[in-house]
Image (cartoon, rainbow, N blue to C red):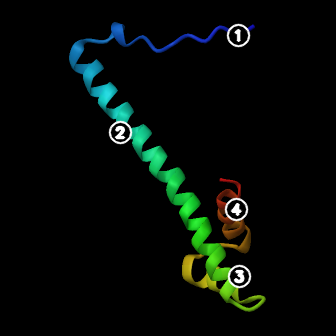
C-alpha cells in the first residue's frame, strides 16, 4: 500500500503560500482551457475533414499546421471520446 503525502502549505511562510496557491489556481484554469481547446480543435478538424476529398485533409494538415495526419487524428479521437 502506498501512502500519499499531501503538500504541506503550512510549512511555507504566508507570502509564499499565498503566491503558490494563486499560481496553482491559475495553472488548473489553464489546464481546463487546454483540455477544452483540444476537444474543440478535434471537432473543427473533423468538420474540415468531412468537407475535403480523400487525401486532401492530410495535405491540408501538413501544409497549414505542419502536422502529420496522425496528429490530427489524435485531436479528433479526443473530441470523439469527450
Q: Which residue is mark 4?
A: 74
Q: Badge 2: how crowded within 10 Å, few (<14), some, or many (20+)?
A: few
- Measured Cα–Cα span from mark 3 to mark 2: 36 Å
Q: Which residue is mark 2?
A: 26
Q: Which residue is mark 3?
A: 58
- Measured Cα–Cα span from mark 3 to mark 4: 13 Å
Q: Secondary structure at mark 1?
A: loop
- Measured Cα–Cα span from mark 4 to mark 2: 26 Å
* Image x and y of residue 74, in percent: 70, 62
- Measured Cα–Cα span from mark 1 to mark 3: 46 Å
* Image x and y of residue 69, in percent: 72, 74
**Is tag 1's residue or tag 3's residue first in the polypeptide sequence?**
1
Q: Which residue is mark 1?
A: 2
> Residue at point 37% right, 13% down?
9
**Is tag 3's residue or tag 2's residue first in the polypeptide sequence?**
2
Where on the picture, by quarter, is residue 40? bottom right
Amino acid at each position: 500500500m502506498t501512502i500519499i503525502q499531501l503538500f504541506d502549505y503550512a510549512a511555507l511562510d504566508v507570502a509564499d503560500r499565498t503566491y503558490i496557491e494563486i499560481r496553482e489556481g491559475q495553472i488548473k484554469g489553464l489546464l481546463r482551457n487546454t483540455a477544452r481547446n483540444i476537444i474543440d480543435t478535434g471537432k473543427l478538424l473533423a468538420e474540415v475533414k468531412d468537407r475535403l476529398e480523400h487525401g486532401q485533409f492530410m495535405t491540408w494538415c501538413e501544409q497549414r499546421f505542419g502536422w502529420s495526419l496522425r496528429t490530427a487524428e489524435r485531436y479528433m479521437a479526443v473530441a470523439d471520446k469527450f
